[in-house]
Image (cartoon, coloured by chain):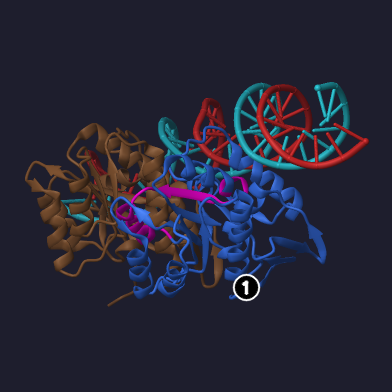
Chain colours: A blue, B brown, C cyan, D red
DNA sequence: CAGAGCCATTCAGGCTGCTGTCAGGTCTCG
DNA sequence: CGAGACCTGACAGCAGCCTGAATGGCTCTG
């Protein structure tokens, strides 16, 4: 899952980023509404974590504007304000959940997982590709009825393929799924994970398109 | 994806061009606003990388004019200016993202990939030419329903033809698609690839225009 | 706290088949 | 018919890819 974190406090931002990353998601961290605006325009996020008090404005307005432009990305508000009125205003503005600082990182994890599950629950929960049966919300895969266990990184990669079956994903797009923007990757990690996925999903599940990337075999012509 | 790079610094331009090419996109590189203007009028780009300080003017004005004429191509600004006011002006002028020099090439890749992701989020258009059916996003070709396998180089060449069906491409234009700008090529490589493409696409798919270049047969008129 | 176990990452060795080159042929035009 | 332009089969070299194994970090457990 790809998460946009909008938070101007360095310490908290890092902690949250690390936590969400550990949970197996890719995190883009910005510190102003201007950058948040730019990010949501160029990237389709699955979840947004939004601080309310930012150097260049109020998160409420940003969220309202986001909703009026048709963006339905789930948003969890992170804030020091704990007034009931704030909570209501946040939910009215289109937030999906609300965390009051200081909050426990494991609590954050739980909310994130819940939003992800709810979000994934809407569109078809079970995806079938070839002999694979995938539940995006629960991160579960069966192959010929047999459950498969994927690690966080394996899942992050696989998710990219399953979301749009048959699509060609370049190496840099795959790196983008595993690591946040700007991260350096300087070995053949992607290849190693492709290899591991093949071992679990079946040898010919993922097709190498030499010089271009990889593609999930869909058995459609 | 087809990218227009507007950058007047030779070294940086080459580096960016090579990087984006490596990521699997087609890059047109121009060094002035005048050429940029001409390019956007003749070609539908999926992304523009725009330097702000150019010999014949300021990128802001160009971008504003572009937006007022209804062009919604995503634009990423590349600039040495890192003033907050510049950032805001850039976003106000209609930019989608902002990269401050010196930036890391992998970061550029990530931003470009983000745009590409959105671009591919739309149902990738199927292009039909003769008995060929081409999906530019997925890099797939079928001929009479039969899937074809093209290598990276073959695809790079073919992409040039399919993007503007019927256009005549000179030998040097084709070389530019395969090799970094300025690379010397001193054999008949292009001819060899044309030959290989013909073997896969059908003997009369590509027409030789003696002394001028090659053209894709469209069976129009 | 030691030890077991799992995971992410890196590295090296080996393999596949793409790439660029050449040679010798065919085609086209004046 | 000659010259130049173009075509294509063959091939060596190597880029790109695959994968087993090693490493180190982390968590869990007793």
Regarding residue B66, the answer to whether it shows in the image is yes
**Residue B64, image x and y in percent?**
14, 60
Position of residue A72 in the picture relative to residue D10 (left or right):
left
Q: Chain of mark 1?
A: A
Residue A34 magenta: yes
Q: Quick one: A151 or A17, which is closer to the camera?
A: A17
**Residue C28, image x and y in percent?**
27, 56
Position of residue A21 in the picture relative to residue B207 (left or right):
right
Which element type, helix, strand or loop, lies under badge 1? Answer: helix
Residue A16 magenta: no
Q: Is residue A148 above or below residue D4?
A: below
Q: Quick one: A152 or B74, which is closer to the camera?
A: A152
**Residue B213, image x and y in percent?**
26, 53
| Tag 1 residue | A121
Position of residue B112 in the picture relative to residue B42 (left or right):
right
The magenta-colored residue range is A20-43
Dot 1 crowding, Cα within 10 Å, few <14, some 14–19, many 20+: some
Q: Is residue B26 above or below residue A133?
A: above
> Please, which residue is most extreme toward the front here?
A83
**Residue A51, image x and y in percent?**
42, 55
Which residue is at a point 76% across and 53% down the rendered structure image?
A: A149
């Amino acid at each position: 899952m790809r998460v946009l974190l909008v938070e101007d406090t360095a310490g908290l931002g890092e902690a949250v980023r690390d936590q969400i990353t550990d949970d197996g998601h890719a995190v883009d961290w910005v510190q102003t509404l201007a950058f948040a605006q730019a990010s949501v325009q160029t990237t389709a996020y699955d979840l947004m974590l939004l601080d309310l008090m930012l150097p260049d404005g109020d998160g409420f307005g940003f969220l309202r504007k986001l909703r009026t432009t048709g963006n339905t990305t789930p948003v969890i508000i992170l804030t020091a304000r704990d007034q009931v009125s704030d909570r209501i205003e946040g939910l009215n503005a289109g937030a999906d959940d609300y965390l009051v600082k200081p909050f426990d990182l494991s609590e954050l994890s739980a909310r994130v997982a819940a939003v992800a599950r709810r979000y994934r629950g809407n569109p078809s929960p079970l995806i079938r590709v070839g002999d694979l049966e995938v539940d995006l919300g629960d991160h579960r895969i069966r192959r010929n009825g047999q459950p498969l266990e994927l690690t966080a990184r394996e899942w992050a990669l696989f998710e990219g393929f399953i979301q749009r079956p048959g699509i060609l994903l370049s190496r840099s797009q795959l790196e983008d799924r595993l690591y946040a923007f700007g991260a350096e990757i300087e070995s053949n990690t992607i290849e190693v994970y492709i290899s591991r996925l093949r071992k679990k999903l079946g040898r010919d599940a993922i097709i190498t398109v030499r010089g271009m990337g990889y593609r999930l075999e869909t058995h459609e012509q």
